[in-house]
Amino acid sequence: MVREALATLLGLEDDIEVAVQAPNGAGLVELAREHAVDVALLDIEMPGRGGIEAAGDLTASGLGVKVVILTTFGRPGYLRRAMEAGASAFLVKDAPAAQLADAVRKVLAGERVIDPALAAEALAGGANPLTARERDVLRAAADGAATNADIAQLLHLSQGTVRNYLSLAIQKTGARNRAEAARAARDKGWL
């Protein structure tokens, strides 16, 4: 329903044409190629493939598709990850409707558009302190891997290495245990 409402809203603009609507985040590169898409409007959480991962796919495709992230998850870590994945704009859903159409125009003109309050928060918060492997281990713990042995098997690591990564992640997030560390990292958009 939200996707269709956004498509209708953008379709009312004289200079914007909605080429295609995707039901999920999988297969976006093929859809973009097939429909000659200039701008993709993505959410952080989409079925099939998340918006940040899909943004990376579109950027890596070489199609030149500009990515606008529009989300309720206005967290500095998500902003940073989206920009690293190649997004040109990052807006929160409570922004005025006119701002979305304006963002589409600006990214087509080669500009970047970032929610100002979120940009300030991201700058104040600093970079994600977790390494890629620490994020992998925390993500596995948060997704239900019950023991260090489970995580080790899933990620093809030794149990000692998993224990070390978890310890570092707990320390960096200021948590008391891995569940708190995973929750803190997700809340900040680091996972």
Image (tube, rainbow, N blue to C red):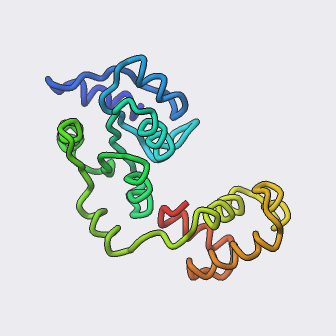
Position of residue 123 measured from the top left corner of the image (x, y, whole percent): 32, 70
Q: Is 110 positioned to the left or the right of 165 in the image?
A: left
Please count the marks in the image. Answer: 0
Closest to the observer: 136 or 188? 136
Which quadrant does the C terminus fall into? bottom right
Q: Residue at x 57, y 82 (%)?
A: 174
Position of residue 132 measured from the top left corner of the image (x, y, whole percent): 59, 62
- The answer to which quarter of the image holds residue 109 is top left
Position of residue 52 measured from the top left corner of the image (x, y, whole percent): 47, 47
Closest to the observer: 128 or 103? 128
Q: Residue at x 18, y 41 (%)?
A: 106
In the depicted structure, whether residue 73 falls above or below residue 147? above
Which quadrant does the N terminus fall into? top left
Position of residue 67 measured from the top left corner of the image (x, y, whole percent): 35, 40
Q: Is 79 positioned to the left or the right of 105 in the image?
A: right
- The answer to which quarter of the image holds residue 103 is top left
In the depicted structure, whether residue 115 falls above or below residue 6? below
Q: Is 167 positioned to the left or the right of 113 in the image?
A: right
- The answer to which quarter of the image holds residue 34 is top left
Q: Residue at x 26, y 64 (%)?
A: 117
Q: Residue furthest front?
A: 62
Q: Is 158 positioned to the left or the right of 60 in the image?
A: right
Q: Residue furthest left?
A: 14
Closest to the observer: 60 or 10? 60
Q: Residue at x 81, y 67 (%)?
A: 148
